[in-house]
Amino acid sequence: MKRRTLIKGLLALPLGPGVLQPALAAARPLRVGVDACPYCNMTILDARYAAQMVTATGKVYPYDDVGCLLDHLLGYGGPRATPKELYVADFATSERREARFLEVEQAHFLFNERIRTPMGVGLLAFGSAAALEAYLKERPQHAGERLRWNELLSRGRKRPWVPGYGR
């Protein structure tokens, strides 16, 4: 058999699903004190407020505040990126030095301007409504709006989440 015929035959073989597709990226661990937010350029110092975007090309962008991720997605600043996966740190299970990420669609958000977050947005993410309620029992002064991801996006289209940033 000629080499050319062999190569053509090998190239014509059907490959199983996923053989030539890149593996799904997952949230990677934050390097607290090292990673910097691409939106506000601040170093991430507390992983409990963090968020993360994995782009279609596999690049990972870490954010120091959920508001930075929202504003970047909505086009208020930051490098151009096409999101593939979006994660937020679960405030209830994360620690200052280690984030436990969950997909944004699974998160339950608490918004209150009096909650101190790195960029002053006042958004916290929780893995469940029960975890959010448990947090509010401990800190009733933080009672505010309970929102889901699509509500955050629609509100962000009206004005930037991060005070002092944006168009």
Image (cartoon, rainbow, N blue to C red):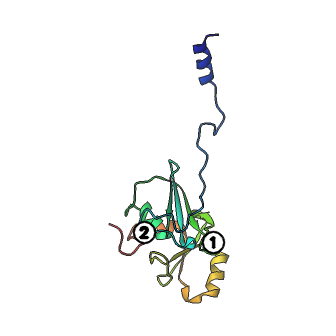
Q: Position of residue 146 (x, y in %)?
A: 55, 77
Answer with the quarter of the image where residue 90 lies. Answer: bottom right
| Neighbourhood count class around disc 2 (C-alpha, 10 Å): few under 14, some 14–19, many 20 upward | some
Q: Which of the two marks, 1 or 2, is nearer to us in this view?
A: 1
For the view shown, which residue lies furthest in the bottom direction?
A: 141
Q: What residue is rendered at 49% in x and 81% in y?
A: 116
Furthest residue to the left? 167
Q: Residue at x 50, y 47 (%)?
A: 57
Residue at x 46% of width, y 52% of height? 82
Is 14 in front, or is 41? 41
Work out how far the residue at label 1 is from the one at label 2, CA to CA, in angstroms: 25 Å
| Figure check: 3 above or below 106 | above
Q: Nearer the viewer, residue 115 or 31?
A: 31
Rendering coords of residue 66 (x, y %)? 50, 69
Q: Are marks 1 and 2 in contact (CB under 8 Å)?
A: no
- Where is residue 111 drawn, in percent x and y? 51, 78
Q: Answer with left or right where residue 19 lies relative to residue 112.
A: right
Q: Amino acid at mark 1?
A: Ser
Q: Label 2 belongs to which residue? A: 156
Within 10 Å of disc 1 (Cα), the crowding (few <14, some 14-19, many 20+) is some
Q: For numbered disc 2, what is the local secondary structure? A: helix
Q: Which mark is residue 94?
A: 1
Q: Nearer the viewer, residue 53 or 126?
A: 53
> Which quarter of the rendered picture does the N terminus lie within?
top right
Q: Earlier in the sequence, mark 1 or mark 2?
A: 1
Relative height, residue 19 to residue 112 (above, below): above
Considering the numbered disc 1 on the image, is that residue within a helix, a strand or a loop?
loop
Could you tell me the amino acid type at mark 2? Gly
